[in-house]
Amino acid sequence: MEQEASESHQHDEDYEHKYRKQIVNRLARIEGHVRAVKEMTAEDRDCSEVLLQIAAVQKALDKAAKLLLKDHLENCVVKAVHHGNQDKVLEDLNKALDNYIR
């Protein structure tokens, strides 16, 4: 899937993703949180505690996705409109949203 995304949506070097570092940092924290939830489960911690932590991970992922969408709209979509490529970028965005929001 990563290969498809890179082929359909190339970025120029003069193109800046304003929130990319924040997104990477959020994902790193989420990764650690998921490991902690896995350990809680392996340690047979209370199910309600584990579910609460899973909900926190889901919320954190949603926030990361929201930030990525903001980055995409402010950069990729705006640039595509300026270059006349809006149809392809909007088609890709719609596919991504259809998969993300079910």
Image (spheres, rainbow, N blue to C red):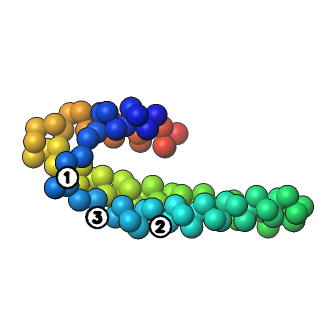
Residue depicted at x 41% and y 67%: 22
- Taking depth in this image into account, of 90 and 9 the one nearest to the observer is 9
Reading the chain from its start, which is encountered first: label 2 or label 3? 3
- Taking depth in this image into account, of 22 and 57 the one nearest to the observer is 22
Residue depicted at x 45% and y 55%: 65
SS state under label 3: loop
Label 2 sits on residue: 25
- Tell me: 96 left or right of 43: left
Look at the image and tell me whether residue 85 can be seen.
yes
Which label is found at residue 13? Answer: 1
* Image spot of residue 18 (x, y percent): 28, 64
* Inter-mark Cα distance, 3 to 1: 13 Å
Which label is found at residue 18? Answer: 3
Residue depicted at x 28% and y 59%: 17
- Taking depth in this image into account, of 37 and 14 the one nearest to the observer is 14
SS state under label 2: helix
User: For the residue marked with disc 1, what is the amino acid?
Assistant: Glu
Q: Quadrant of residue 92?
A: top left
SS state under label 1: loop
